[in-house]
Amino acid sequence: MKRFCILSLYFFWVFLLCAQTVEIPGAYRWTGVNKSETGLDYVFVVPSSSQATIRFNTTSGSTVNWYKFHQTGINDKDFFHTGNVLSTAEKDCGYVIEQGDVSIYLWVSTYKEVASLYPDEEFTDQCNQVRLAGSGLDIPYYTTDGKWKSVNRVVTFKTWKWDDILKDLKMVDDTVQCEVSKSGETISLYAPAPYEKTLFTVIDSIPYKGWNSAIKKITTSEEYDSRAILVKAVVTQLREKAINELQSDMEDGVFGGSAPVEMEFKAYVSGDNYYAWEFMQEDPNEVDDPIIDAIYTDKILRYTFNSEGTTYVRLKATNSYCSKDTSFTITIGESSLEAPNIFSPGTSPGVNDEWKVAYKSIVSFRCWIFNRWGVEMFRFTDPSQGWDGKYKGKLVPPGVYYYIIEAKGADNQNYKLKGNINILRPRN
């Protein structure tokens, strides 16, 4: 019963909180405000020519008190109003609405048009970002502890992106929400670096419905010459594991297993940037300047790994300004080879009717099978294959046969195995 009462009280307060909302008719409510970072529940943007009327919607009949604060934050808030509606509210300031134990914090900003826009060619991190400068970029507001913030701006530009369906790079018109930053008196937008020569356009994210105004756009006057590089690699392990081939447990993102391991590497790089596949024994994510053992400039590279150990393959693209890479791990396990001594061909189809070795990382293999008089019954050079117990198309009689195996492992271990094979079959 006590638990039921506590839950009921909790849901009552949740309902009460959800029922308390704030609206400004004709204003734009920006949904990108972060409560934990700013302390604000709402940020509204109002046209410069409009009056702001703030309405506090609540299901409670208790008293509603209003406080106003400015750029210094809520430590300097002033009480000035009581009631559910604040007509002709002042813009570019914050409000605290209190009812009982609930406090709601909001800021009301005046809309500002972007007047000019250009990329900063002196910006030092052009491999990752583009700094857009100009005037009118910010629509400022202040947090409850007096920190300057701005409503994001929507920026569009051409770039390359990876298409998972086409499995290729695709040119797109990208649209991103860009944060506005302030350093001293300088206001800037930081957009992701494009992978193509492009113009930048700021499209106001403010919805103009009811404002009787067209959506504002402003575009840079000259194309920005992209320096950033987009790199994507598609890596496929081509050979499937044979039924009688042992495999080591592989971590996620690691290729390899039992040699020989045939891999296909496909490179996708934006623009005319130089790129190459680099093979190395040191992890490039842990070693700053690993020793490169081999370099291949193929767009599609097929390579077979035959040696035990770990090889790191890095696709690296560069130009005069930027470098981008992605790497992969291929691990080949040590070898092993075991031969069974009994099977029963022609007895139960699909059950123990083929003589096969159990192996791992065998890169060279030859096997001969003889009868007791030294007549060769069968020979093969692929460890994934086996003997079906037939000679010249017919099942051999049950009894003892002999095998000789010469093989070499990916770890350079040489195998020379000899033994007998017992063929079992019912007399009937």
Image (cartoon, grey):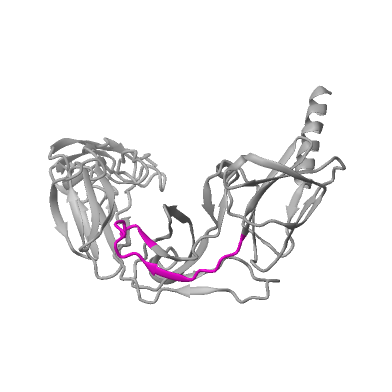
The answer to whether 190 appears left or right of 316 in the picture is right
The reply to whether the magenta stretch includes residue 123 is yes
Which residue sits furthest right? 61
Residue 352: x and y, percent? 36, 42
- Residue drawn where x is 73% and y is 58% of the image: 24
The answer to whether 334 appears left or right of 46 in the picture is left
Residue 198: x and y, percent? 37, 73
Residue 323: x and y, percent? 25, 57
Say if 174 sits above or below 406 in the image.
below
The reply to whether the magenta stretch includes residue 232 is no
Residue 382: x and y, percent? 22, 51
The answer to whether 364 appears left or right of 127 in the picture is left
Magenta residues span 110-131
Answer whether residue 348 is visible to the viewer in this image. Answer: yes
- Residue drawn where x is 65% and y is 49% of the image: 94
- Position of the C terminus, as image quadrant, is top left
| Near-viewer residue (22 or 184) | 184
- Position of the N terminus, as image quadrant, is top right
Q: Quadrant of residue 76?
A: top right
The answer to whether 389 appears left or right of 36 in the picture is left
Main secondary structure type of the part rendered in magenta: loop
Say if 220 sits above or below 267 in the image.
below
| Near-viewer residue (87 or 255) | 87
| Near-viewer residue (209 or 303) | 209
- Residue drawn where x is 57% and y is 41% of the image: 145
Q: Quadrant of residue 369?
A: top left
- Residue drawn where x is 18% and y is 63% of the image: 297
Answer whether residue 387 is visible to the viewer in this image. Answer: no
